[in-house]
Image (cartoon, helix red, strand yellow):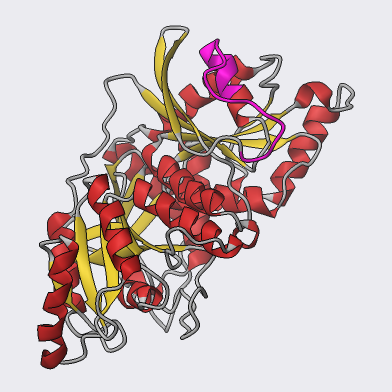
Amino acid sequence: MTLPIVSIVGRPNVGKSSLFNRMTGKKLAVVDSESGVTRDRNFATCDWGGRSFYVVDTGGMVPGTGNTMERMILEQAEIAVGQADLIIFTVDCHTGVTDIDMHIARQLLRTKKPVILAVNKSDNDRYDLEANVFYSLGFDNLIPISAANGRMVGELMDEVIGRLPTIADESSEEGEIRVAVVGRPNVGKSSFVNWLLGEKRNIVSDVPGTTRDSIDSPVVIEGRRYVLIDTAGLRKRRRITEGIEYYTTLRTVRAIQRCHVAVILLDAKEGLNFQELKILVEVGEAGRGMVVVVNKWDIFEKDEDSAAVYAEQIRQAMPTFSHVPIVFASGLTGKRVLKTMAEVDRVYAEFTKHIATPELNDFLIETVKRQPPPAAQGKWIRLFYMTQPETAPPSFVIFCSHPKLIEEPYLRYLTNRLRERFGFEGVPLTIKLKPRGQKQQ
């Protein structure tokens, strides 16, 4: 399910970052009395009242500014407004309505998006009365708050989840596979997608970051229906200095959440680096299938053993993801691109595979006989039976005695044995431990 986006906007120094920190419960954003401190944007997931959403912090908006940095911050905030499902317009109760507030209000009213007006620094009931002057900005949903001490922030959060759009679970049509093409900037994602589409639908350029948004393209390949999601390149957070790139990073994270299988492209000349490993972790944490593609293989100097050596180097560099298939391809010439889609099909089949309970219990008996869990705190641990309550991604439950005493190395052992017996190549696996007699949830 794709999470909605809530963007916090307003002029400089009204307390947007303080509100962001209060909503997320973490000090993720820098807070300073000097205006303009927030430049590189923050986003984080927020949970309230059973709903989850992204909350995005933005820099102070100064419409019509001639200052270069302020223009960049303004552009970033406007992008955040464009991508938001709901906007929290933050103003300062102490200073009252300013010309900049009125200018921003007119911009937000033109978007026709839901807006909640948060009158910040309303530290007591007296300020609540003074906050009413902000109704002149044209918004009906006005809540006086104090981000610094948390006053009325809970009421604001209630209003947020009450006005969030209903995001339906993006279930595919029968047989349709959603594939996100992800990787660093300029690794060849758009060329790869364009070859599959048979047309230059996505802009291809040598300039990194040409693709600014996630683009969905339905396509039928050899009788199978796909939705290809071409995304902007993910790069290291500390290098995301341009506002557009920051927000496209968030869009890429959402694209990973929406897909069934992520195709992670590497540049054959540059190989696997820390950023690709971060992407693999992102895909794994989202519970999605994955295929690694070494792109631009057509221009890589090689011999007949190069692919095998290269693949082994990659597997050594990512031992946690050694189950992920690797394809050597060229999005420019189309070589092995269809092979990649065959791997996507195979991973999707593993992603949706269900193992019957009797087979799992036979597996559990054999696996425990081969290596029983070590005793802990003077207690013997027994594993009684095993089921698979979910697919896409596959999730398993083992009912046992003393589940809290089973440590991570033994869980890895069980996971590795599961892969040996049943496959699940390219798919993250989850094993949950529960005491016998507890109901599945």
For residue 150, which quarter of the picture?
bottom left
Residue at (11%, 91%) from the top-left corner? 125
Q: Considering the image in quadrants, where does the N terminus appear?
A: top left
Task: Find residue 406 and report its horizontal and vertical position in percent.
Answer: 42, 69
Position of residue 30 in the picture relative to residue 111 (left or right):
right
For residue 121, which quarter of the picture?
bottom left
Residue at (35%, 67%) from the top-left corner? 100
Q: Is residue 207 magenta?
A: yes
Task: Find residue 212 and report its horizontal and vertical position in percent.
Answer: 52, 39
Q: Which contiguous range is marked in magenta?
A: 192-209
Q: Considering the image in quadrants, where does the C terminus appear?
A: bottom left
The answer to whether any part of residue 157 appears in the image is yes
In the displayed orientation, state which residue is furthest to the top. Answer: 222
The answer to whether any part of residue 423 appears in the image is no
Q: Main secondary structure of the magenta part?
A: loop
Q: Nearer the viewer, residue 131 or 116?
A: 131
Residue at (55%, 40%) from the top-left corner? 232
Position of residue 263 in the picture relative to residue 429 (left or right):
right
Q: Nearer the viewer, residue 50 or 281?
A: 50
Q: Is residue 325 magenta?
A: no
Vertical side of 371 occupied by 394: above or below? above
Task: Find residue 405 and report its horizontal and vertical position in percent.
Answer: 40, 74
Position of residue 311 in the picture relative to residue 113 (left or right):
right
Query: Number of labelled discs?
Result: 0
